[in-house]
Every structure is written in structure tokens, then in C-alpha cells.
Amino acid sequence: MTTQGPLYPPSEVMNTDGDFVVIGTITREGPDGGVVAVPGRAIVAADSPLPEFGSTLPYRIVRELPERLSPADEAMVLATLPLPLPCSNYTAVMAPQQQPDPFSVTRPSYPFHQVPIPDLQPEDGPKVTGPVTLGQWVKARGEVTVTLTGNDTAAEFRGEFAGLIPDSLYTVMAIRRRDMDPGGPAHPSPLGVPNVFVADSEGNGRYRAVLPDPFPAPDAPNAANRVVNFVVLWMSYQLSYGGAVGHHGLGADIHAQLRLDPPGFTEFTTRP
């Protein structure tokens, strides 16, 4: 369970005070004056120092979040990130055909239950009508099973999830090795298309996809396409985006809730 995608922005979830709610990796000043990145939970200021891509600086921590949340923290209302994204150094265009100029868009942060879903009419029956709280968010859990198929030319991914936000849209994202280079020719991609599932009224969900050659060897010509993580995204606008994971990503319209501890899938190798 997480609230974090990359280290910047520090989280894909904010509170209504405009601070990042970080469950994942925290960058801190180390004992030697350098920067260390360690697992943790904290409320992090949106004006934290922003380094160049690939570097780190210590987050400006407003306060720590304990492993066992207080009643007040459990009731914390969660929200999207505004645009332009605060404290972000990831320059990849998420949806080059659908939104080729995402960095020109401006919009505020919205509590998750008040996101302006496009073309929604009240009589249509929106399902996320009450605040989504941190206490709800941290209940998420899941399991992913991978099976190589087609004589090791493909892999089947099966996910079983519980504790999700009930009656709402989720998608699954593949983190590939190439995504570590935001200036590269590709953009972050779904794990399967369509990559959607809907959590039921109890917060349960399941997902299945088969990908061709998702784990090429390090010396293969397509080694950059290797899948290194499986990320379950909550979709605040209740939209999916075809071959893109979102128009803006990184907490503006997608929100990582479950992911593997890296490195993922190191035991698998596939071939064309």
C-alpha cells in the first residue's frame, strides 16, 4: 500500500491543507549531511525543495505519520494534486495524442469526492459521494501472480485486491525500465488495454492481463521495455485513457495505491 509514484512529486495524494500525504519513501538529511531515502510515512510540504531529475533533496516534513494512525489522521480527507503539479521534476508527456501540452493546464486541488467528473449530471448516479479518508486508503492490500505462457514469449498477470475504495474505478499501470528516462521516446503505459476494473461494494477487485514479452533479458534489443513494477491506480476522475495511464498522471488524475516493492519480477525472463 502506498500513496507514492516516483519520489517527485513526493506523493500522488494530498490533504485538504495542500500538503502531500506520503506513504512510501521519505528523503531525509543523513548523518553525514547527505540525503538518504528510507521507508516511512509523513505529511510533507508542497514547497519542499525540488532537485533536478535523478537527484534527491530532503523533503520538508510537516510532521511524521505513525504506523498506527490516530483517529484524526484516519479521518483526514484526501485530495488530488493541483496543476501545474507541485514539486515535480518528471517531464514525460503522459498522453501525447490526447493531451500533447499538459504543462499548460491549470486547475486546483479537489477533494476526491468533489472531483468534477466530465459531463457528469447529478441524476447519473455518481458513486463516490462521501469523503475518501486516509483511514480508508490504508486498508488496501493485494496479491499478484505471474505465469509465463506461450513457451516463455508472454506472461499472464492476475491480481486479487481487497480494501479498495468501494464502487470506484481502478486501472493497472506497468512500470517499465524505460520510464526511468522521462526524455525518452515512450510514455508510461497501461498493463494491458483496457486496463480497468471496478472495485465492488466491499472494496474487492480482480484483474487479468497477458502481455507479450514483458521481461526481456538485459542484453535484448528491447531490454528497456522490461516490466519492473505493477501499480494499481485509483482514478479520481473515474476515467480510463486508452493507451495512456492518464492525461497528467502523478496525482492529478491517477493515484498509486498498491505497488510491488522494487525491484520486481527479477525472477522472470521472456523472449520474442
Image (cartoon, rainbow, N blue to C red):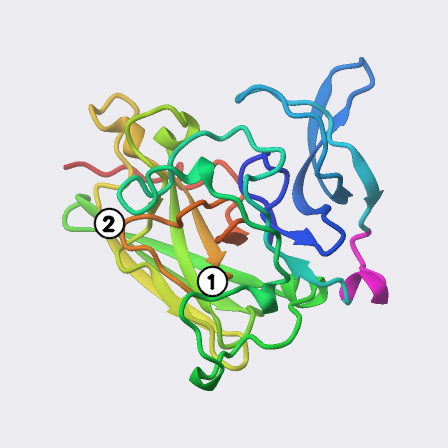
Identify the residue at horizontal 82%, vertical 44% (top origin): 64
Residue 44 position within the rendered picture, expressed as x and y whole percent measured from the top left: 75, 40
Q: Residue furthest bottom?
A: 123
Give the residue type that dot 2 points to.
Answer: Leu
252 or 103: nearer the eye? 103
Identify the residue at horizontal 54%, vertical 36% (top origin): 6
In the visual, does 185 lie left or right of 138? left
Element under disc 1: loop
Q: Which residues are magenta?
A: 66-74
In terms of sequence position, does the residue under pointer 2 or pointer 1 come before the other?
2
Which mark identifies residue 237? Answer: 1
Q: Are marks 2 and 1 in contact (CB under 8 Å)?
A: no
Element under disc 2: strand
Marks 2/1: CA–CA distance: 26 Å
Q: Residue furthest top?
A: 32
210 or 186: nearer the eye? 186
In the visual, does 246 lie left or right of 46? left
Q: Is residue 17 above or below residue 223?
A: below
Identify residue for label 2: 211
Residue 72: say if magenta: yes
50 or 224: nearer the eye? 50
Residue 262 position within the rendered picture, expressed as x and y whole percent measured from the top left: 51, 38
Residue 165 position within the rendered picture, expressed as x and y whole percent measured from the top left: 56, 70
Within 10 Å of disc 1 (Cα), the crowding (few <14, some 14-19, many 20+) is many
73 or 222: nearer the eye? 73
